[in-house]
Image: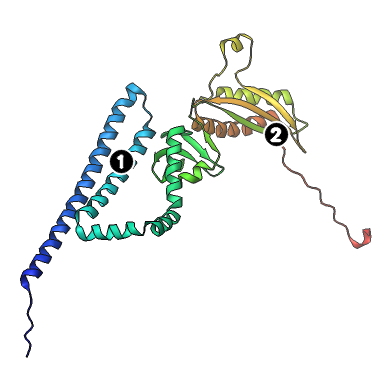
Amino acid sequence: MKILSFDFSSFTETNHRILQYLIVSLAIALLAVVAARILRKIIKVYFERSSDIMKVDPTRYKFLRNAVSFVVFMLAITLIFYTIPELRSIGITLFAGAGIFAAILGFASQEAFSNIISGIFIVVFKPFRVGDNIKIGELHQGVVEDITLRHTVINNFENRRIIIPNTVISSQTIINSTISEEKICAFIELGISYESNLELAKTILAGVIERHPNCIDNRSPEEVADGVPKVIVRVLGFGESSVNLRAYAWASDTGAGFVMKCDVFEQLKKEFAAQGIEIPYPHRTIIHKTESDA
């Protein structure tokens, strides 16, 4: 009859080693979290204090802050693998098959690396910065809030956050309203009927825009001396049922220009109606034939 024996000392030693590795891993992970937060805080405080004096672009510190966190956590994972012998052997095995692993990883993370590279190009070449009012393609417009390793966050005018991958932004046409100066020239276009008084319509249009509080005077002193009007109104051409006009109205920024354009259209509807200026709309003539007409 065999008597089964159990080596309690070996079992205890194994549990003690596992517990030790677990404590070391948790300690490294905790230190990585604390170190990442401290470094992010230091970077944020330094750049915010320096921005007023050195005119430092906040885009750089936000991107650097995200990159620092990524590097710290990658170093922590590497240190955990190096500290635990069992994980170290797994790491050596993985590196032994690095060819296949690298191919799989490269294929799977191709888009992620493309976003990182595109993010670096955005920070280096600066087509836009944090705080800029931009329009991406024909769909998205708003203020840039953050640029991360993977994506860019835009706060649109509905106060919704639009998260766009950096590769998508790099392949789109970008309209930046604040890259050099914020003031814009808003085009206010409308048509009047051929029977309406053209000069009176131009005078009313220019007057409504000039009286709006968001309209600014963009004329140089020489243009003022030469009598160039504050708001220029031109005839664009002739439509099927209208004479098309365009007014060039300057505003301090995109938001002010949008508000001015909406208010001007509302006021023009009232003043045109009072002055007998007709805003045409499509007319259609329908001829109905009966059998007797055939």
Which one is in front, 25 or 4? 4
Q: Is residue 144 above or below residue 53?
A: below
Say whether residue 252 is left or right of residue 246.
left
Is residue 139 shown above or below 23? above
State which mark lies toward you, 2 or 1. Answer: 1
Identity of the residue furthest to the bottom in this view = 1
Q: Along the polypeptide, which appears first: circle 2 or circle 1?
A: 1
Camera-side residue of 245 and 213: 245
Q: CA distance from mark 2 to mark 1?
A: 56 Å
The residue positioned 57% from the left and 22% from the top of the image is 210
Question: Three-letter amino acid code at disc 2?
Answer: Gly
Q: Position of residue 143 (x, y in %)?
A: 44, 37
Kindly state the secondary structure of the residue where label 1 is placed.
helix
Q: Amino acid at mark 1?
A: Val
Report which residue position mark 1 lands on. Answer: 68
Question: According to the image, label 2 marks what residue?
Answer: 191
Residue 103 shows in the view: yes
Secondary structure of the residue carrying tag 2 is strand
User: At 23% from the left edge and 47% from the top edge, which residue is drawn?
Assistant: 33
